Amino acid sequence: MAKKVKKRGKIVDMPKKEVEGSSVVTTDHAVSLIAAIIVLIASIIFLTPWKVGLFGTANASPVFGIIGIILGLGMLIATLLMRRNPREASVFVLIFSIIALIIPPSGFVIGPIMGIIGSVLVLAKVAKK
């Protein structure tokens, strides 16, 4: 429904401004954001000098931690761009999540899985519109 605005003493119907998927991204945006933060935290913990819990491999390459940070930052940037271009951003989050699932720190496994779920939900909602 068009918005009513008063212009020069007359009430005029303003056309609705449609942005692709503008109302689509709410909880899905939050799920992808949390996934990106989890991947970043797991990668930073992987790079710490002391090894905690599952990250206790002494001969682990720091290259995997750096790749994990790059993937987490890519997911974070794509998630922040999701409000403007939900389809393209969710594809990027999906790709980064799949790669993050393969790389050793793997975001405690739940991070990439949440990223995959969030991006698939956004893609499904955008395809419905």
Image: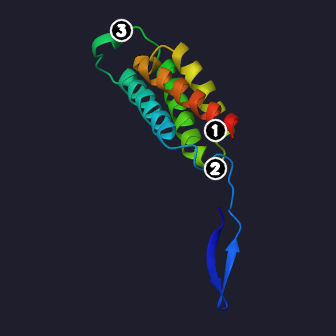
- The local secondary structure at tag 3 comes to loop
Q: Name the residue under label 3.
A: 58
**Relative to 23, is 58 above or below?**
above
Disc 3 or 1, which lies upstream in sequence? 3
Q: How far apart are marks 3 and 1 (CA)?
A: 36 Å
- The local secondary structure at tag 1 comes to helix
Image check: 1 left or right of 55? right
In-front residue for pair 40/64: 40
The residue at the far bottom in this view is 9
- The residue carrying pointer 1 sits among few (fewer than 14), some (14 to 19) or many (20 or more) residues within 10 Å by Cα, namely many
Disc 3 or 2, which lies upstream in sequence? 3
Q: Are marks 3 and 2 in contact (CB under 8 Å)?
A: no
Residue 93, image quadrant: top right
Q: Are marks 3 and 1 in contact (CB under 8 Å)?
A: no
Q: Are marks 1 and 2 in contact (CB under 8 Å)?
A: yes
The color scheme shown is rainbow
Image check: 123 left or right of 109? right
Residue shown at 50% from the left, 18% from the top = 64
x, y percent for residue 52: 28, 16
Q: Mark 2 points at which residue?
A: 84
Residue shown at 59% from the left, 35% from the top = 122
Residue shown at 36% from the left, 9% from the top = 58
Q: Mark 1 points at which residue?
A: 89
Quarter the N terminus occupies: bottom right
Q: Which amino acid does label 1 sit on?
A: Ala
Quarter the C terminus occupies: top right
In-front residue for pair 25/111: 25
Residue shown at 39% from the left, 21% from the top = 46
Q: What residue type is labelled 3?
A: Ala
